[in-house]
Amino acid sequence: MGEPVRVSIVAQDPILEAGTRASLHCHGDISVAPAGERAQVAVMMVDRVAPQVMNAVRAGRGVDGRQEVVLVATELAAIDAVQAFAAGVRGLLRRSECTAERLASTVVAAAAGDCTLPLDLLDGLLENGQGTGVRRPGSGTGAAPGSSTLSERERAVLRLVADGRETEEIARELCYSPRTVTTVVHDVTRRFHLRNRAHAVAFALRAGLL
């Protein structure tokens, strides 16, 4: 077992901050940093994904690009996901769905460079991309040169990657081999010149390729 993921908690409500700290203290793979101390992952508790929140995310990552951000919001819509991932957020959770276990798994995934968001939110992006400002190929709004649409298999794999699933879990759910899942992700990252799984999900959401 590796070193625990060091996490900082940012919340305007001190009671909410204390409760979040207490819930994460129970997980052996997470170490909660003292208030005000930077860590591998910052958990930000907010009411909604407002411009000032996105500015804070960008400013924090500008100071230390190695620190990932998990955002827990009371209100969360599809357009919020686009804006959050564009700002560098790795994980998105609704506060009403934020159990201790789910928050911990999202934090660990963020530390590993993976993106996580509610699956129904991803479905909303896929169904209503044009209305939420997600770019689509051929729309004249900036799809990468030489880009193409994703295959159904690639879409299925990226949906589960976005939900924080590990390679073995994705393979079991889709009845593929783990090697096939790895190959699918590798093909997408290579085709669009992306860095990793997290970048692939964020790019696909922003460019409307899903």
Image (cartoon, rainbow, N blue to C red):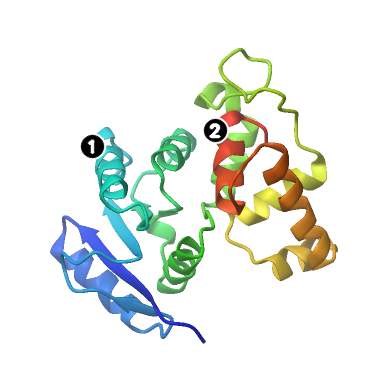
Where residue 160 sits, quadrant-wise, is bottom right
Q: Mark 2 Cα within 10 Å, few/some/many (few <14, many 20+)?
A: many
- Report helix, strand or loop for mark 2: helix
In-image side of 173 versus 132 (left or right) = right
Tell me the amino acid under the disc marked 2: Arg
Vertical comparison of 10 with 202: above or below: below
Where residue 57 sits, quadrant-wise, is top left
Where residue 80 sits, quadrant-wise, is top left
> Residue shown at 77%/51% (left/top)?
184
Percent x, y for residue 3?
Answer: 42, 82
Percent x, y for residue 191?
Answer: 73, 38
Q: Which mark is residue 24?
A: none
> Residue shown at 42%/35% (left/top)?
83
Q: Which mark is residue 206?
A: 2
Tell which circle, 2 or 1, labels the residue nearer the N-terminal end: 1
For the residue pair 105 and 95, the one nearer the viewer reads as 105
The quarter of the image holding the C terminus is: top right
Tag 1 residue: 52
Tell me the amino acid under the disc marked 1: Gln
In-image side of 180 versus 111 (left or right) = right
> Residue shown at 26%/74% (left/top)?
21
Q: Residue furthest top?
A: 140
- Report helix, strand or loop for mark 1: helix
Q: Mark 1 Cα within 10 Å, few/some/many (few <14, many 20+)?
A: few
In-image side of 93 versus 127 (left or right) = left
**Gap in angstroms between the C-alphas marked 2 and 1:** 20 Å
Vertical comparison of 138 with 108: above or below: above
